[in-house]
Amino acid sequence: MAVGSYAEARAPARRRALARAPRGTLGLGISMIYLSVFVLIPLAAVVVKAVEQGPTAFFDSITNSVALTALGVTLGSSLVVAAIGAVMGTLVAWVLVRDRFPGQRLVNSLIDLPFALPTIVAAITLIALYGPNSPFGLSLAYTRAGVLLAFLFVTLPFVVRSVQPVLIDLDPEAEECAASLGASNITTFRRIVLPAIRPAIASGAALAFARAVGEFGAVVLLAGKVQIASIVIFADIESDAPQAAASLSVVLLAISLIVLVLLRLLGNRNAR
Amino acid sequence: MRVSRRATLSLRTVAIGYLVVLLLVPLGLVFYRTFEHGFGYAWSWMTTPAAISALWLTLVIAAIAVPLNTIFGIICSYVLVRGRVRGRAILDSLIDLPFVVSPVIVGLALILVYGEGGWFGNWFISHGIPIIYAPAGMVIATVFVSLPFVVREVAPVLRAAGEEQEEAAATLGASSWQTFRRVTLPSIRWGVAYGVVLTSARALGEIGAVLVVSSNVAGSTLSLPLLVYQRDSQIGPAASSGAYAAAMELIVISLLVLVGMMLLGKRREEVR
């Protein structure tokens, strides 16, 4: 009985405490628990696994030749993909915003195709085209060029979709002004358009880079002997070497975190 | 920019040519490869017991993961935009993690937590709840990879909607639940819908994270993307026909998703 009356006395107090708490307290708690169960605790387990046998084991697993080659190939290809994506994505965005031609809306919605298409479908389309039975006699599968193509396919929308809205909001008057003062197309683009869209290009390219570094589905059929970091991690898991897999994962996670922080800084600068 | 006719035309050609080579030619070839032996042959590959149960499993996984992430996404964006509680900044920066973590790492992380000898794995196994190499693990992996979409779509819409109407409702005596259901929810519904479409696309097509935690046994833990992978890994023209047929099912699903994106994207722009 005493316990019951205690609980009865506490309940309104607790309700009052919750009402006094800043708005969103309960929601923040639910969100953090959800995020922890599905994302944070699993990722923490990877980090713990990588370092629990000491720093030497960790460094050994990321400095052996397989791991180093994989990291080199992955980072190199991702940088190339980010660079090509930045140039081609800006070009496509410009054509979609400033050009008018029949079928433009269809082309515009095609851009989202790589987001809508499962990555394994991307892989099988690329195998059909550039694999051993290529109708064009191009056998790019199992080469670094094939991996590059797969990365370009899955990261296509990032730069386009980040540059496009900025370009739409950009006032054409400044460009016309520059042109009427005698600036050539290239000068106008370099001095007027580019400075305005540079942050958008950078954040699109950074997202493309991060996506390429971790990409798995699109290259799993194509990579073959090309050692991509995610493929090496998968092979490590399959051959029951979780410590090696976790160590390489930690390196990739660190790279992703750096990209995420850079994006945040970029976003803050844009917002100002 | 007053770009000359010739420059415009050549830019347009380059942009469309890039998209055709990267997107349309590969996709067209998969259509050809799927139906080159006739529709009936492809259909027979789509209706094998393994293929039917794979399609079913894919839909079931999405049917669990998408509502979970939608509810979380609405709560989380409410906290981020309307909350006054401290710690929102931390939540905001952690939300994007699943976008930049490689899917293979997700799989590894889940094995380390829920697998045999993992942090919680033994508890689940001793209570007869297998997670790794079981559909439950595939659901958790899917929740992980598709977690941020709804938040990232809803938060800007909620911010744009402003607080005045909610305050007005509160002044008129509506409870906070009434305000949420009658004022807030209708104002964000297109953002929610777009986020749901993006989440579904990702959930239906995920392979990397799911491949690691699946036992890849047809009829129990083989989802549609895994079926494509498994069939393509087998040797011989028959198996590759099967892979193309399964990929075609995914393509049809994702084209539906793309149409949804087009329709909802327009509504969303109007709201913004």
Image (cartoon, coloured by chain):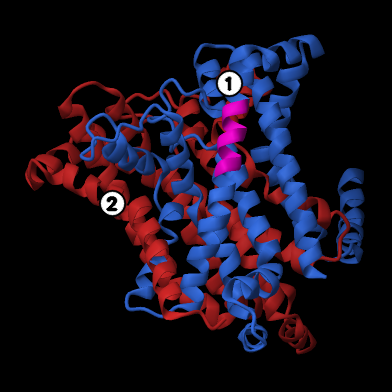
Chain colours: A blue, B red
For mark 2, name the chain: B
Q: Could you say which quadrant of the image residue A63 lies in?
A: top right
Q: Nearer the viewer, residue B35 or B62?
A: B35
Q: Nearer the viewer, residue A263 or B48?
A: A263
Taking the magenta stretch, the answer to whether it contains residue A81 is: no
Residue B196 at what x, y percent from top left?
A: 50, 60
Per the rendered image, the range of residues in magenta is A72-80
Say which residue appears at 73% left-offset and 41% top-offset: A257
Q: Nearer the viewer, residue A101 or A37?
A: A101
Same subunit, labels 2 and 1: the answer reads: yes
In this view, which residue lies farthest toward the front?
A: A182
| Residue on which disc 2 sits | B25
| Residue on which disc 1 sits | B115
Say which residue appears at 58% left-offset and 78% top-offset: A168
Residue type at mark 2?
Val
Q: Nearer the viewer, mark 2 or mark 1?
A: 2
Say which residue appears at 92% left-offset and 45% top-offset: A2
Residue A68 at what x, y percent from top left?
A: 64, 19
Residue A246 at what x, y percent from top left?
A: 66, 21
> Label 2 neighbourhood size at 10 Å, few (<14), some (14-19), many (20+)?
some
Report whether B93 appears left or right of B258.
Answer: right
